[in-house]
Amino acid sequence: MIFRLNQSSGIPLYLQLIEQVKHAVETGALREGDQLPTIRKVAVDLVMNPNTVVRAYRELEHEGVLELKHGSGAFIKESAGGRARVMRKAQAVVQSALERLAPLGLTEDELRRVFENELAQARAEKRLAPARHRAGGSVVPQASINGEGKP
Amino acid sequence: MTDFIIETNQLCKSFKGQTALRGLDLRVPAGSIFGFLGRNGAGKTTTIKTLMGLLRADSGAARVFGIPVTDADGSIEVRRRIGFVTEDKELYPYMTVEQIIRFTRPFFPKWRDDLEQRYLKMFELPPKKKIPDLSKGMRSKLMLLLAISRGAELLILDEPTDGLDPAATEDVLRELVAIAASSGTTMFFSSHQLAEVELIADHIGIIEQGKMIVTGSLDDMKAQYQRLQVVFADSVQTPSHWVDGVEFVRQEGRVLSILASHNVDAIVEQARSLPGTAVERFPVTLKEIFLEHVRSN
Amino acid sequence: MLLYKGWLETRLRLLFSLAFFGIFLIQAHVMGGIKPPDGAKADPVKVYAITEIFLVATLCGMVAGAGIATQPAFQGAKGLHGSMLFTLSLPVSRFRLLAVRAGLGWLEMAGGIAAMCCGLWILFPVVRAATTVPEMLEYAGALIACGSGLYFVSVLLATFLDEQWRVFGNMISFAALWWLPNHTPLPASANVFRAMGEGSPLIAHSMPWTAMAFSLELAAILFFAALKIVQLKEY
């Protein structure tokens, strides 16, 4: 399993790791029942703090993406596939939106800016689903999700 | 309360009229990898020397493993459990690699022969070479070997990757992480390489002019600190009083750049309330947190 | 392990000291000696060799003692740098560090003197000076005893003086040791320098007991003082 982290991006490493595991699940690289590398292996391969890996794995367990079987390791949970299906639907929507934007002839950067602005607007107007992971103790964790999280 | 393997309280130290430490408070949790950051001359090495019992502080208290550094017998016991890498990486000029290993080994009952062999090979240290003939990078690696092979519970490293090329740096960091993962050894290291610190540290402390100005869990810090870019349509209008959480504000043309340490949503609201603004949020790197804090002092 | 380190550290210096002595012996032979003082027993060559040697022995006593501090001092000040940092970070008390270094240095001084006396004993016949084994042993003993006081002066100074001041400290102390016996209630024969030179068994007719006793007492007191000072700096 190849994970790649960018420590200069400003996004906490444990969040990056969480996102990458989820992404792997969504694209099917990691399937239900697959075993993730041990905490030690990830820490050493990526040269990152083992406590950070622990935090990411625990968070993923809390969100129901994986389960930690004491003594044997971390395994992708059966129900993680559900979220992947939702993501694939979303992907289809974005794909059709891009097709419809094509005639406007926007560059990639312009497209990205448009999307980011809409995202920021939606966030400000609280139209987005709340983040599902705990940040630094200041956000209240959501009830356990089994892949079909609703706002 | 978590176990603090290193703890200082209002540590003060001056040399010939120059104050190196003015009331330093430091807390290093056991089992953590703690990155100690600061500009040159901010007091990092003085702090480390005080912890090792090499310097006597003028006032304040410091404890390692719960033992005060001023306790003479305790200090010897503490040094038996610590692996130390000095800043200038100086060792005995009349010894070879082999000889200094042979010299150091008997002082530490928990010496790990397996680690010694492992690092001799990994760092490619020629056993019969005289120490002054080694490059600075090799001396760094030798000191690391001597520090890690002790089987210490705590590693105190002053610029451990100084003089190392990127490949060697990677090797060293990987080894440190592997040791932390397998034996829970606490690591306290000072470094100028923020990228490295960002990678392997879970706690950091920034020292400036002898005082600790920021300290805490790195993940928490990066999650809570954010940069806000406030773009004004016409002229910049700063409110008379920013809400809580605004650490530093800088103006560049029609843009206000704000570094916020918490309470970001409220700050965004306040910024939006100003006439003709667009507000954007960005995550913050350790480098930005560091530079903003030391620049303004 | 500290002995091992000390040996590796100082063996080169010891070698040089011995070589130094050798040079003087050769010089003595070449120059044919100096007229001995009245009433003395020795012949010119011996006298020459001795006066030179006592000078060198004094210097070496200084150097050996100061050699304890070729590494920055045992002070806990900002003068702390280099490999001394590594040494002090080891789990060993400063007391033990000084004791071993000073002790080893003294042994080397004694050994050096003994070796030099052997050299003298072998070479004197070559330059047609006569000497006996007992005489040589007396000489060696006297030198070692008198040198000890000087050596430990250097040791003590090293515990609290910065590197650049040590040489001055040594010079002043030695001058004091030369001057004191002649101007204070101390017996004139306590002058250790004279005891190593003109008063030595090779020239005079007896062992300079006073000087030896004085020196050894001084050595003990100073060694003890140095250890105490270092202990105070201990953490």
Image: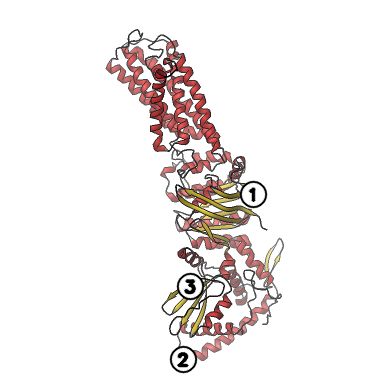
Sequence-earlier tag: 3 or 1: 1
| Helix, strand or loop under label 1 | loop
Disc 1 or disc 2, which is closer to the eye?
1
Question: Which quadrant does the C terminus of chain C fall into?
Answer: top right
Which quarter of the picture shows residue C56?
top left
Amino acid residing under circle 3: Val
- Mark 1 vs mark 2: tell me if same chain: no
Question: Label 2 lies in what chain?
Answer: A
Mark drawn on residue A104: 2
Amino acid at dot 1:
Gly
Q: Which residue is mark 3?
A: B249
Up the image or down, A18 lies above or below B149; here it is: below
- Give a yes or no on whether discs 3 and 2 share a subunit: no
Residue type pointed to by label 2: Leu
- Cβ–Cβ under 8 Å for marks 3 and 2: no
Q: Nearer the viewer, mark 3 or mark 1?
A: 3
Label 3 secondary element:
strand
Which numbered circle lies on residue B279? none
